[in-house]
Each structure stands twice: as C-alpha cells, then as structure tokens.
Image (spheres, rainbow, N blue to C red):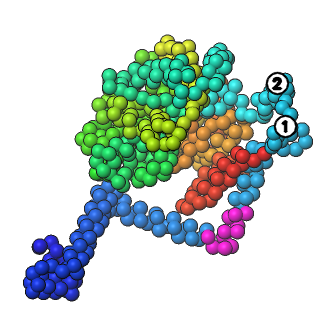
C-alpha cells in the first residue's frame, strides 16, 4: 500500500504497529483494521479539502481568494466593533429612530383614523364595507394612476381591469387542486402554460407550470435543478452560479434549499455577466447556471448564447429569467427593435421563468415556469403517497390555489392577443428608448448622468456620470431619487454601483415627458451641491449601505417588515 505508507511517514507509531503486527501475526487484528480505517478516512478528508481548495482557487484565482478572505475578515471585525456596548447602544438608538419614522410614514394614525383590530360584533352591511373600501382606495399614495411609479403597476387600464374582475367573480370559489370540480380552471391553466411555451419557442417536449409569481417560478426552477442533480449525479453540496444582477429570488431559493451561491460580477461597459468567470466557477457540484433577459437592476440582457455554450459543454442546466421580459421580449424582433437570443431556440437553455403578471398584464399573483422537457418539470413536483389524508400531489409550493387568478390571467392573455402585445411592446420599448436617448444626449442631463449599459427592453438605469471631472456638474444620484420622490414620483434606487432606474409601464408611457422634465429640473437643482438633509434613499444607501457589515441594513429592513403588520 504505497499510498498509506507515504501517509504514515508523519505517524511513526502507527507505521510500527502496522508492520510489526501484520508481519508477526498474519491475521489482522481489529486494532489494525481500525488503523487502516483511520488512514483511509484521513486520505479521504485530505483529498476532499485539496480538491475544494483547488476548485476555489480555479474559480476565484489567488488574488481573488485573498481578497475574499480579506473582505470576510474586515466584515467580521467590523461586526465585532458594532457589538461593543457603547457602539451597540448608539446604533440601536439610531435604528429605532429610523423605524419609528418609518412607522409614522406608513401607518396612519390620529383622529379620523379607525383601526379595526377585532371582528365587528355583528357583521357590517354591504354598504358599510363598500364605503370603507372607498376610503382605503383613496388613502394618500404615490399616483400610479398618473404614471408616477416605476414598475409596480404594469397595465391598470379600465377595460382590462373590468374584464379581470368579471373573471374573478365567476371563478371566485374555484381551486385548481380539484380539477374534477373546476374543469374550466384546469383547462385555462393548461392553456396559459401552452401559450407561453409557444411564445418562448419551446420544443415539442416542452412543459410548464403556473405559479403565484416570479419568485415562486424561480424557486421552483432552482428546486428542479437541485433535485435533478441529486437524483442523477448524487450532488450533495449543490452550487449555483449567478450574475450578481440576477433577481434576489435565486438567493432566496439558495437560502431555502441550502445551495452555495457564486455571484459573478457584471462589469462595465456592457454590464453583462462576465463569462470567463462563470466558466472558471463551474465544477461537479454546479447544479444551475443563470442568465437574465433582462435583469431587474439595469434592464440588461446577459449573453445567453455564451452561457448556453458553457451549459452544454459542462452538461449543466441553464435558467433564463424572463420574469421581467415576460410578454415584451418575445415581441422585440417583430416590433423592429434589436432583439437578443434568449429563449428555447438557444440550445443550452433548460428552463425559463415568465411573469404573466408583469407585461402579460394578468392580475398580480400569476407567473409561469417553463422547462425544455416534462422530465425536468417532474423534479419540482411534490407527491406524498402515504398521508392519512390521502395520496397528495401538488405541482408547486402552494396547496390550494386561487382559480380566480388563473381565470384573470387567461382572460388577459386572450383579450390582449398577439397584436395587443405587439402594440404595447412598441409603446413601452419606444418610451424606454426615449428616456435613454434623453439622458445620453440632452444638455441638461448628459454631463451629470450616464446610462448603464445598453438597455434593450423596458428598464433604463442611470448613475452619476463618473467621467465628469467638473464639480459643477457632479450630482449624488440618491439625492436625485429623493428629489423625485418629493415631486411625487417613485423611481427605484439601486446599489453597487449607486444608480436609479425606471421600469416603463403602460401608465408611464403617457407621463414620460413630465417625468423627463422633472428629472432635468431635479438634476439642475442638485448639481454641485450635495443635499444637506439626506432623504430616505440617500440615508439607506449612502450611509448605512456603505458600511462593510450589513447587519444595520438588515436590522432596518426587518424593522420595515415589522411595520407592515402594525395597526
Ligand atoms: C420581478 C422580477 C422577478 C420576481 O418576480 P416577483 O413576481 O416579484 O416575485 C424575477 N426576476 C426579475 C428580473 C424581475 O424583474
């Protein structure tokens, strides 16, 4: 056993025992077997850790690995610093203050506001409920109706809303978990999936499932990939490679399902995921590669064909997140815009998430996850054969599901039709290009702002112009976001790099000139003089966000979540 001899060099006692006993006694004793076992275990662990180290070094490089260690140590030390009693009390006081401010903003109080925290002793009349619903609808809010909100409300047209409510009423009690009781809902659900498969050029073998939203679609695709890797390759320590701009739903899935995440940078000027890094990070534990078409932060479409080549070469599944692209990106080519390759026509793509509740204009609570084959879809199913409640089978996370939402989705898709989506694609992408063009070329904006990458779909992101050396034109991008908020707009603040974006929706199409005018005014006002009294975006991303340890931000965000349930 040359291997064990080499190993035993550092362990003289073990070696002596091994030779003396085996030569003298010939029949090996239990103690000897124990030694051999110990050696084997040692070899096993050494090999394992050597391999892990090698894979890590290949993925991140020597410098990258050292940087990772440095950042981790720095973060931990900073975390310890924050735990010092006097620092801790200061931080806590500040966090509490911010949370109270948040509550004052979000939770209405004072005279005239009644909080209903217990059931009415006797039920209200229909009129009373209606009157209260009126009040709730009219609570002071950012005017999405006037196109003042980025993303969030994707259609909101009266005719479509009326049709959706009618579909709700008809199928209000329905639940697709009982297909025999509600055959119409089963039919509509299958048809929504079939139409979406067609739109994304799935092959004959293609299959899909409808879900409650983009997050669930993504969680299901990640689950399917993990289960597949476990079943077919016994991968016990799954890893997934994400562009760092990929939606957080992937990180959520990784946390839920214990999958290690490798986040890959998306460098300027293209802001697409860095393909050579993805390539270096693939190893035998990789269960899934991910690309976005487009991503949420910058509206950039990753290089899906390049990811596909890596996926095919390494036999790894590739998920394309079209949650946001949904029913716009398939119409780009027909509408005459530049169109990337992103769907099942790219051979390595194995699953796609599509939000019918974004640019499909279905009511919120609708999305679809598509697979290249029905076998892959099976890996997301949950089946329990021995439950006292009966044999139980459900396609996705939920048990009971709202058939009303499926009816609302089906009605929206049928009402819109190909021509409807083509026309909205023209309007929405046209408006996105208009914003991009204005930021790039207008004298009022181009010196202070720069567009991130080359947006192709419905999102345009911009940051402070870093090439600008003249302090007169310098702006703090978060001040711009806050100043827009003060003018009644809601744009999305981004981080790493600091930026803001507009996700164009149907209501924004009619409001874009007003929006651009306000952006120009605000940029003019913010030039050269960073605002003294920081607004919410500037406070959250500028100060708290710049700390290496994110525990304060997490604390604030959790406080925000608590606030949602305050009465
Ligand atoms: C919105 C979005 C999702 C997730 O969708 P939800 O419906 O909010 O769960 C996923 N990916 C991208 C790119 C998105 O924009």
Q: Answer yes or no: is residue 492 visible.
A: yes
Please give the name of the residue rendered at 56% of the width and 14% of the height, measured from the top-left corner. 415
The residue nearer to you, when weighing 546 against 113, is 113
Classify the position of the C terminus by image quarter. top right
* In this picture, residue 132 sits left or right of residue 354: right
**Residue placed under numbered mark 2 in the picture:** 126
**Would you say the residues marked 1 and 2 are in contact, meaning their CB atoms lie under 8 Å apart?**
no
Figure check: 366 above or below 252:
above
Residue sticking out furthest to the front? 388
Percent across and percent down for residue 69 are 41, 65
Percent across and percent down for residue 272 are 40, 40
* In this picture, residue 250 sits left or right of residue 206: right
Figure label count: 2
Q: Check if residue 250 falls in the magenta segment.
A: no
- Cα distance, mark 1 to mark 2? 13 Å
Q: Secondary structure at mark 1?
A: loop
Q: Secondary structure at mark 2?
A: helix
Q: Answer yes or no: is residue 349 visible.
A: no
**Residue placed under numbered mark 1 in the picture:** 120
Residue 30 found in image quarter: bottom left
Q: Residues within 10 Å of mark 2 (few under 14, many from 20)?
A: few
Segment tinted magenta in the rendering: 83-93
Figure check: 136 above or below 51:
above
* In this picture, residue 76 sits left or right of residue 49: right
Q: Check if residue 88 falls in the magenta segment.
A: yes
Classify the position of the N terminus by image quarter. bottom left
Please give the name of the residue rendered at 56% of the width and 22% of the height, measured from the top-left corner. 181
Q: Main secondary structure of the magenta part?
A: helix
The residue nearer to you, when weighing 292 against 5, is 5
Please give the name of the residue rendered at 53% of the width and 39% of the height, measured from the top-left corner. 389
Percent across and percent down for residue 70 are 43, 66
Q: Residues within 10 Å of mark 1 (few under 14, many from 20)?
A: few
């Amino acid at each position: 056993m040359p291997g064990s001899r080499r190993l035993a060099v550092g362990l003289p006692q073990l070696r002596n025992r091994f030779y003396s006993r085996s030569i003298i006694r010939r029949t090996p004793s239990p103690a000897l077997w124990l030694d051999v076992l110990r050696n084997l275990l040692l070899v096993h662990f050494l090999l394992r850790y050597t391999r892990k180290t090698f894979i890590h070094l290949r993925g991140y490089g020597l410098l990258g690995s050292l940087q990772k260690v440095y950042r981790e140590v720095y973060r931990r030390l900073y975390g310890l610093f924050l735990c010092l009693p006097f620092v801790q009390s200061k931080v806590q006081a500040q966090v509490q203050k911010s949370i109270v401010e948040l509550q004052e903003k979000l939770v209405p109080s004072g005279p005239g506001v009644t909080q209903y925290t217990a059931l009415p002793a006797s039920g209200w009349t229909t009129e009373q409920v209606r009157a209260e619903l009126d009040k709730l609808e009219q609570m002071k809010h950012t005017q999405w109706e006037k196109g003042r909100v980025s993303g969030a409300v994707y259609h909101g047209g009266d005719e479509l809303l009326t049709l959706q409510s009618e579909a709700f009423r008809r199928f209000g009690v329905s639940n697709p978990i009982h297909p025999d009781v509600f055959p119409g809902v089963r039919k509509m659900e299958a048809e929504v999936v079939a139409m979406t498969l067609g739109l994304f050029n799935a092959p004959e073998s293609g299959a899909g499932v409808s879900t409650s939203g983009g997050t669930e679609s993504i969680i299901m695709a990640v689950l399917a990939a993990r289960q597949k890797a476990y079943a077919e390759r016994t991968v016990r320590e799954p890893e997934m490679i994400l562009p760092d701009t990929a939606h957080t739903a992937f990180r959520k899935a990784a946390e839920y399902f214990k999958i290690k995440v490798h986040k890959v940078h998306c460098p300027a000027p293209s802001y697409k995921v860095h393909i050579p890094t993805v390539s270096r990070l693939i190893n035998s534990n990789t269960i899934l590669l991910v690309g976005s078409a487009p991503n949420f932060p910058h509206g950039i479409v990753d290089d899906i064909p390049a990811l596909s080549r890596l996926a095919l070469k390494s036999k790894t599944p590739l998920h394309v997140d079209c949650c946001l692209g949904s029913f716009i990106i398939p119409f780009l080519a027909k509408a005459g815009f530049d169109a990337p390759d992103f769907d099942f026509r790219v051979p390595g793509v194995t699953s796609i998430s599509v939000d019918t509740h974004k640019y499909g204009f279905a009511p919120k609570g609708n999305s679809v996850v598509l697979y290249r084959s029905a076998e892959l879809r099976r890996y997301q199913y949950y089946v329990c054969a021995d439950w006292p409640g009966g044999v139980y089978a459900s396609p996705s996370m939920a048990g009971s599901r709202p058939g009303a939402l499926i009816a609302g989705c089906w009605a929206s898709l049928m009402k819109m039709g190909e021509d409807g989506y083509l026309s909205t694609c023209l309007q929405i992408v046209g408006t996105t290009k208009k914003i991009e063009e204005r930021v790039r070329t207008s004298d009022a904006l181009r010196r202070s702002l720069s567009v991130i990458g080359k947006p192709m779909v419905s999102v345009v992101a911009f940051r402070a112009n870093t090439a600008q050396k003249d302090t007169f034109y310098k702006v703090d991008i978060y001040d711009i976001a806050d100043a827009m908020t003060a003018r009644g707009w809601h744009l999305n603040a981004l981080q790493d790099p600091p930026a803001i974006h507009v996700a164009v929706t149907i209501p924004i199409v009619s409001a874009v000139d007003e929006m651009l005018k306000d952006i120009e005014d605000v940029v003019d006002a913010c030039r050269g003089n960073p605002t003294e009294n920081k607004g919410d975006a500037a406070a959250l991303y500028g100060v708290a966000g710049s700390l290496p340890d994110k525990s304060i931000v997490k604390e604030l965000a959790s406080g925000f979540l608590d606030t949602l349930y305050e009465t």
